[in-house]
């Protein structure tokens, strides 16, 4: 998966659950576009889609605040292996 496709995949998933326009830097929780229940759905999606394991140490909301932050988080998880 290319760098851009990763963010596009995350954006598309979030977009399925959001009625408002947003961009890759929009803080989706801060702006109230999604709620804490969605965070669980998002983490489950990320684990399945990108073959990563979200651990307790990964539960920092900074990792999930925007599409770009999620992309960075996924890349870091894959590098850490």
Image (cartoon, rainbow, N blue to C red):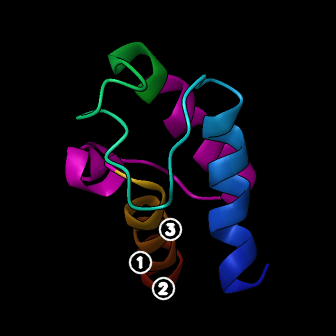
Whether pointer 3 and pointer 1 mark residues with C-beta atoms closer than 8 Å, the reply is no
In this rendering, the label closer to the viewer, 2 or 3: 3
How much space separates mark 2 and mark 3, taking CA atoms? 12 Å
The residue lying toward the viewer, choosing from 39 and 77, is 39
Is residue 30 on the magenta stretch? Answer: no
Quick one: label 2, few (<14), some, or many (20+) residues within 10 Å? few
Q: Which residue is mark 3?
A: 71
Q: Position of residue 2 (x, y in %)?
A: 76, 84
Q: Main secondary structure of the magenta part?
A: helix
Residue at point 53% right, 35% down? 42
The residue lying toward the viewer, choosing from 47 and 23, is 23
How much space separates mark 2 and mark 1, taking CA atoms? 5 Å
Determine whether 44 is above or below 11 in the image. Answer: above
Q: Position of residue 37 (x, y in %)?
A: 41, 14
Q: Position of residue 36 (x, y in %)?
A: 33, 19
Q: Which residue is situated farthest in the right direction here?
A: 1
Whether pointer 2 and pointer 1 mark residues with C-beta atoms closer than 8 Å, the reply is yes
Residue at point 36% right, 18% down? 35
Residue at point 63% right, 52% down? 10
Which quadrant holds the N terminus? Answer: bottom right
Quick one: label 3, few (<14), some, or many (20+) residues within 10 Å? many
Q: Position of residue 9 (x, y in %)?
A: 73, 56
Q: Which residues are magenta?
A: 40-65
Q: Which residue is mark 2?
A: 79
The residue lying toward the viewer, choosing from 68 and 41, is 68
Question: Which secondary structure lies at badge 3?
Answer: helix
Q: Which residue is mark 1?
A: 76
């Amino acid at each position: 998966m290319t760098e851009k496709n990763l963010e596009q995949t995350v954006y598309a998933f979030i977009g399925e659950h959001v009625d408002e326009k947003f961009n890759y830097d929009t803080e989706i929780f801060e702006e109230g576009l999604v709620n804490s229940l969605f965070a669980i759905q998002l983490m489950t999606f990320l684990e399945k889609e990108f073959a990563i394991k979200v651990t307790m140490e990964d539960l920092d909301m900074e990792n999930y605040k925007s599409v770009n932050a999620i992309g960075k988080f996924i890349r870091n998880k894959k590098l850490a292996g």
